Amino acid sequence: MCLAVPARIVSIADGNAMVDMAGVVRSVNLDLVSGAKVDDYVLVHAGFAIQIVDEEEALKTLELFKELMEHEVSQ
């Protein structure tokens, strides 16, 4: 099973972006998306941004991940 996680682009340099994934900042490659800019949300899989996504949908997905983690911890 593959999982792509939404992340917000905080900076871009040399074809790579620094993205914020729920407070974790890491570098991802932008070669697979064109037109991505700072403050866009992208889906990240295996170190690559694979798609630009709507902010509202990204935030909904991040909230669902948070709820899943909270449920898992309480079990």
Image: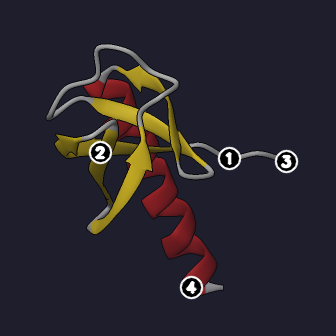
Q: Which quadrant of the view contains residue 60?
A: top left
Label 1 Cα neighbours within 10 Å, binned few <14 / some 14-19 / many ≥20: few
Find the residue positioned furthest to the top: 35
Sequence-first disc among 3 and 2? 3
Q: Residue at x 21, y 43 (%)?
A: 13
Label 4 Cα neighbours within 10 Å, binned few <14 / some 14-19 / many ≥20: few
Q: Which residue is mark 1?
A: 3
For marks 2 and 4, give the CA distance.
34 Å
Q: How far from the left and from the top, in percent, is residue 58?
A: 37, 34
For marks 2 and 1, give the CA distance.
19 Å
Task: Say which mark, if any, is on residue 52.
Answer: none
For marks 1 and 4, give the CA distance.
23 Å
Q: Which amino acid is tagged 1?
A: Leu
Q: Residue at x 54, y 51 (%)?
A: 47
Task: Describe the element under mark 1 as helix, strand or loop.
Answer: loop
Task: Say which mark, if any, is on residue 17.
Answer: 2
Q: Which amino acid is tagged 4?
A: Ser
Find the residue positioned furthest to the front: 14
